[in-house]
Image (tube, grey):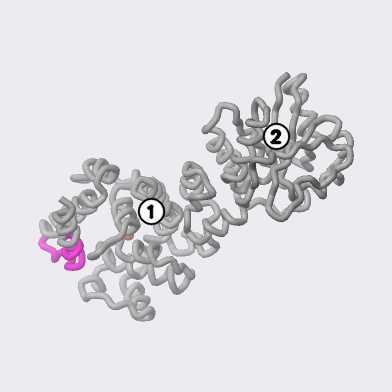
Amino acid sequence: MQRIGVLGGMMDPIHVGHLHAARAALDAGLDRVLLAPCLTPAHRARPQAPAEDRLEMCRLAACVSDRLEASDIELRAGPCYAVDTVRLLLRRYPGARITWILGADKLPTLRRWYQADDLFALCDFYVCPRPGFDAAYPVPGARVDILSQVEIKASSGDVLKRLRALDDAEALLPREIARYIALRGLYQPDYLPDLARYGMREKRVRHTLGVRQTAVDLALRWGASMQAAAIAAMLHDIAKPLPLDQMRALAARYGLRLSREILEDGNLLHGPVAAAIAEHELGVSNGAVLSAIACHTTGKAGMRTLDKVLFIADAIEPNRADYPGLSEMRRLAKTDLDAAVLLSMRRTKEYVLSRGLRFCSQTETAIRDLEKQKEETK
Ligand SMILES: [Fe+2]
Ligand SMILES: [Fe+2]
């Protein structure tokens, strides 16, 4: 007889707590566990991520074991009762024994679940202890076993709090899921603006999304926060559509201390101005994000990982039309981040000088600084 477990809930997002519970249920004798996000649970606030994203995250989480499986069985329109899900599963897997997996926090209300007596007759329960809840809470009529080897401490609330603070919540989220969240722009702070409000045309929006994709993967590769990289990418060009005099007015209003060469060139000035808008108008307070946005046009001495990630992501994102050095930069970005940034700056320098223009002295400083660091690490 096949034993199938169902781990339901909003999975908004799925996190290590769910996975510990699933693993413990398998260890306790189940043949397979379905990770089954629900549409909108009764009496709960609506989930923050769309159902298809929550299901996709379950698919990614299920990749770690062939006994885990993401299931859309609870993504039914209308009221979604456990008893209906169990009936559907029994039809799909005739003769199987179904076990519903839940946290100890759910036990006190279990008797009030829809058609509870029918549910108790059709399936049994595994309960995962949770701090502050009685895992042995008596539920008359229900067959309940306690998965005593796990205690679920993580909650989706904890995960969301960390993600909103632009932390990847590494201890609570499998990496692939943190990456998916950053790539899709899920669970971002409310300040992320509607880019159209900042006058961005379609082509620039496409560029921005391309930068996000590249920056998130480079952040994963080089150990920066993917969530921070995603936000920095989304905001890096918000000042770009502004006319130069308006950029200058904003630079003056927010007291930016910039050299004349930067103040005279919108191609350079839109970086620091975007950071000022992010900080003063949108309320971004993360220093690493603001720094990366501010120096994405010029670089600077002492660039940190996120600065370099955004700088090079901007240069190599997939929508960029080919230019000399692009494929080499793309290759280097994965193997030697400093070399990629250096190559990009040197190429820009060649290009600027070939047109008889002056090269930005802040970028010159950044180049010297990166060269020095490279010497020192040799
Ligand atoms: Fe830019
Ligand atoms: Fe850009």
Query: How far from the left and from the top, in percent, is residue 279?
Result: 43, 71
Q: Disc 1 to disc 2, how far (Cα)? A: 35 Å
Q: For the N terminus, which image quadrant? A: top right
Find disc 1 in the rendering and name its residue.
224
**Residue 364 within the magenta-colored segment of the rendering:** yes
| Residue drawn 61% across the image and 33% down it | 70
* Residue with the most extreme front position: 149
Q: Residue at x 53, y 58 (%)?
A: 162
Residue 66's x, y, as percent? Answer: 56, 27
- The answer to which of 75 and 11 lies nearer the viewer is 11
Do tag 1 and tag 2 residues touch (Cβ < 8 Å)? no
Say whether residue 250 is visible.
Answer: yes
**Residue 316 - label:** none
Position of residue 325 in the picture relative to residue 181 (left or right): left
**Magenta-highlighted residues:** 356-367
- Residue drawn where x is 43% and y is 62% of the image: 199
| Label 2 Cα neighbours within 10 Å, binned few <14 / some 14-19 / many ≥20 | many
Residue 215 in picture, x, y percent from top left: 37, 50
Q: Is residue 340 left or right of residue 279?
A: left
Q: Is residue 322 visible?
A: no
What residue appears at the point 65 percent right and 40 percent down from the top-left corner? 149
* Magenta run includes residue 357: yes
Callout 2 amino acid: Val
Query: Observer-nearest residue: 34 or 279?
Result: 34
Comes first in the chain, label 1 or label 2: 2
| Helix, strand or loop for disc 2 | strand
Question: Is 208 positioned to the left or the right of 90 in the image?
Answer: left
Q: Amino acid at mark 1?
A: Ala
User: Which residue, given by chain and number where applicable, does mark 2 sit on?
Assistant: 6
Could you say which quadrant of the image residue 332 lies in? Answer: top left
